[in-house]
Image (cartoon, rainbow, N blue to C red):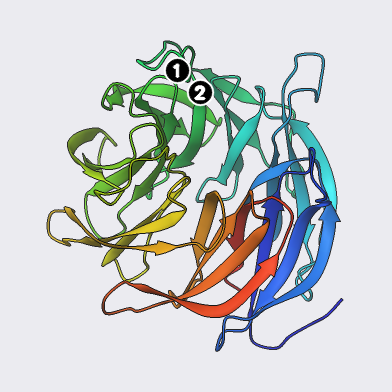
Amino acid sequence: MQQLAKDYYLYIGTYTDGTDSKGIYLYQINWVTGELTYVDVYEANNPSFLATDRKEQYLFAANEISNFDENHTGSVTSFRINKNDKSLTELNAVSSGGAHPCYVSVDNNGKYVLAANYSGGNVGVIPINDDGSLSNDIHVAQHRGKGANPGRQSAPHAHSVKTNIRNTIVYAVDLGIDKVMIYNFHESSGKLTPADKPFVQLAPGAGPREIAEYPYGSFAYVVNELNSTVTLLNSDPDDGSLEGVESYNMLPEEFDGDNYPADIRIHPNGKFLYASNRGHNSIAIFSINESDGKLKLIGHQSTKGNWPRNFTIDPSGKFLLAANQKSNDVYVFEINNETGLLKYTGHSASIPAPVCLLFLRN
């Protein structure tokens, strides 16, 4: 394995079905220039989303499949991260609790993996054993209903799930029913129970996909796949309840093609929000009013490829990396910390069907 000094490691999840991908790719990025260097690849089946515990001892991959067991579920695979070279050793795989898991996260105390099952329309909470392997004692919360778009919203489609900053609430964003489901998270058992205000309703046909909590105030943002907007929500830190404030268009006025937003990120300095456009093939750049969370669209950056399903910001906030699923590449952009705008660094990497980028912080 190649090694570089003093640079960040990056895991890249991919789609392996119908592609040349072998699984999870490991790269390093030069902190000064943004250059990407291939390190290794680890076999995995459709590892479309990745997460680590806070100590970065283990990596968990959502295997976006529906044939893991007789119940036609997908799976989550656990890997041990080698402290020295960041290589992966597979530990085990268990059911995700539903078909086609497309998102995984880990609670803030590293006790559970949370999986969003798109086709299953539910979320699974999976205990993490002391050795980093996963338990089969899964708790599942099933969503019900449908949305306004008959082609995409005839049933629930859980698209992301994560605990709040306090680790007391779980937010499950469901594209199929235009809701963010809100659960009380019982850390002792891993069970989810409906909160006093069990959901927030988004605009009919919005297709909410992912949520990002603002780290310095009581609000959050949801990116909506079906109407190309970002919605600002006020949040109550005590009970986790959410209330819609307003939504913002992610596209330039002159664009009239099909577009399906995917990912959303807040810059570490809290001043800017970024969201990806699949179709317009860009990163929408917003400034954040730090007092009330309101957004202002300040620009777009082409991702220089096709279908940016996922992007990420390095831990220092210097670089933004965009993964273009259909053009099989990852491009590196430098972030202007004063304006929020992006500039192509000249560096990219060819990777088959990249759909998730995950930096290690340590």
Residue 55 visible within the image: no
SS state under label 1: loop
The disc labelled 1 sits on which kind of residue? Gln
Question: Can you give x and y, in whole percent of width and height, for residue 154 in the image?
Answer: 47, 12
Residue annotated with mark 2: 157
The disc labelled 2 sits on which kind of residue? His
Residue 4 visible within the image: yes
Snapshot quadrant of residue 269: bottom left
Between the C-alphas of marks 2 and 1, the distance is: 8 Å
| Mark 2 in CB contact with mark 1 (< 8 angstroms) | yes
> With respect to residue 269, does 168 lie above or below?
above
> With respect to residue 18, does 329 lie above or below?
below
Q: Residues within 10 Å of mark 1 (few under 14, many from 20)?
A: many
Q: Tell me the residue at 54%/22% (across/down).
A: 122
Question: Can you give x and y, in whole percent of width and height, for residue 290 in the image?
Answer: 17, 62
The dot on residue 153 is 1
Question: Can you give x and y, in whole percent of width and height, for residue 86 in the image?
Answer: 76, 69
Q: Nearer the viewer, mark 2 or mark 1?
A: 1
> With respect to residue 21, does 348 lie above or below?
below
Closer to the camera in the image, 263 or 131: 263
Closer to the camera in the image, 229 or 109: 229
Q: Tell me the residue at 83%/50% (across/down).
A: 20
Report the side of 167 relative to 18 (left or right): left
Snapshot quadrant of residue 10: bottom right
Figure quadrant of the C terminus: bottom right
Question: Can you give x and y, in whole percent of width and height, for residue 34 in the image?
Answer: 57, 81
Q: Tell me the residue at 68%/29% (across/down).
A: 96
SS state under label 2: loop
Q: Tell me the residue at 35%/24% (across/down).
A: 178
